[in-house]
Amino acid sequence: MTQLVHVDDPADPRLVDYADLTDVALRRVREPAEGLFLAEGEKVVLRALHAGYAPRSVLTEAKWLPGIEEALAEHDCPVYVADETLLRQVTGYRVHRGALASMQRRPLPSLDDVLRAARRVVVLEDLVDHTNVGAVFRNAAALGIDAVLVSPECADPLYRRSVKVSMGSVFAVPWTRADPWPETLDRLRDKGFRTLAMSPDPSGSSLPTTDLAPPVAVVLGTEGEGLTAAALARCTDRVRIPMSAGVDSLNVAAASAVVFYAVGTAGSPHGQA
């Protein structure tokens, strides 16, 4: 039972969830504190709804309403309809595909719940770029990773940019915070996971010759500096992707795709995950 509401005032207090979306520092604090996140674009909004997230409200141009109206029908939330100019005034930027939904966050599952059926896991330590986090989630969903663990200082997977880049894959892959950190790596080992620290260190084993049979956890470090010494010390193996042409490493999102494909096909007949 959606409630269509036409709005024409960018200062309308009912639109507060969508205000100042370009202020990253503000939104990083505000959204988790208020239990909300933003889904942007028709496909991502639909994927959030289909994943069971409850909408607080929707802000959209009229032309995008037909694509999401049916999925919203069972939800009792206001749908604010406005023109492109108002959306830009409220959010601070041109909204791609003209639809935004403010969604209610859910409590994060426990580590035990996330790992219960998982055999292939990725662990992210302190990635600060929301684009990279979103890309890693998209790669994980596409390449057979069962769960993602993110360290306490890692960028929020439900931040708008992460959700958008992942194309909603953050809703498809179970995830939770790896807290306490880095002690969570000890818990993975205790549960039988081999923890593979991805590092360009030449002393590590080469990815093509590494035993990747599950249960296995791929551990990826922050952009630039890579994994901390504390995390490296708790991993069972160090693994590198062989490089050519004098290149020392790949972007973390690109590296994740290479490793996830290798892990997803390891031990499977005919190379199928």
Image: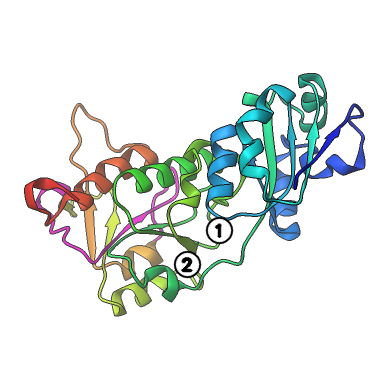
Residue 178: which numbered mark, if any? 2
Label 2 and label 1: CA atoms lie apart by 10 Å
Dot 2, how many residues are within 10 Å of its Cα: few (below 14), some (14-19), or many (20+)? many
Residue 87 in the image, given as x and y percentages of width and height: 78, 27
Q: Position of residue 126 (x, y in %)?
A: 49, 54
Q: Relative to 61, say whether 162 is above or below.
A: below
Q: Main secondary structure of the magenta part?
A: loop
Q: Residue at x 76, y 58 (%)?
A: 34
Left or right of 130 in this view: 59 = right
Q: Position of residue 145 (x, y in %)?
A: 32, 54
Q: What is the span of residues highlighted in magenta in the rendered image?
A: 207-228
Q: Tag 2's secondary structure?
A: loop
Tell whether 85 sits left or right of 173.
Answer: right
Left or right, 103 with respect to 134, comes to: right
Describe the element under mark 1 as helix, strand or loop: loop
As displayed, is residue 268 above or below residue 115? above
Q: As rendered, which of 178 and 81 lies closer to the eye?
A: 81
Q: Let me know if residue 217 is in the magenta part.
A: yes
The x and y percentages for residue 164 are 55, 37
**Observer able to see residue 183:** no
Q: Which amino acid type is shown beneath numbered disc 2?
A: Ala
**Dot 2 and dot 1 residues touching (CB under 8 Å):** no
View extreme (bottom): residue: 190
Earlier in the chain: of badge 2 and badge 1, it is 1
Q: Residue at x 29, y 45 (%)?
A: 143
Mark identifier at residue 123:
none
Pick the front one: 92 or 107: 107
Side of 47 relative to 120 (left or right): right
Label 1 amino acid?
Glu
Check if residue 10 falls in the magenta segment: no
Q: What residue did someone put label 1 on?
A: 153
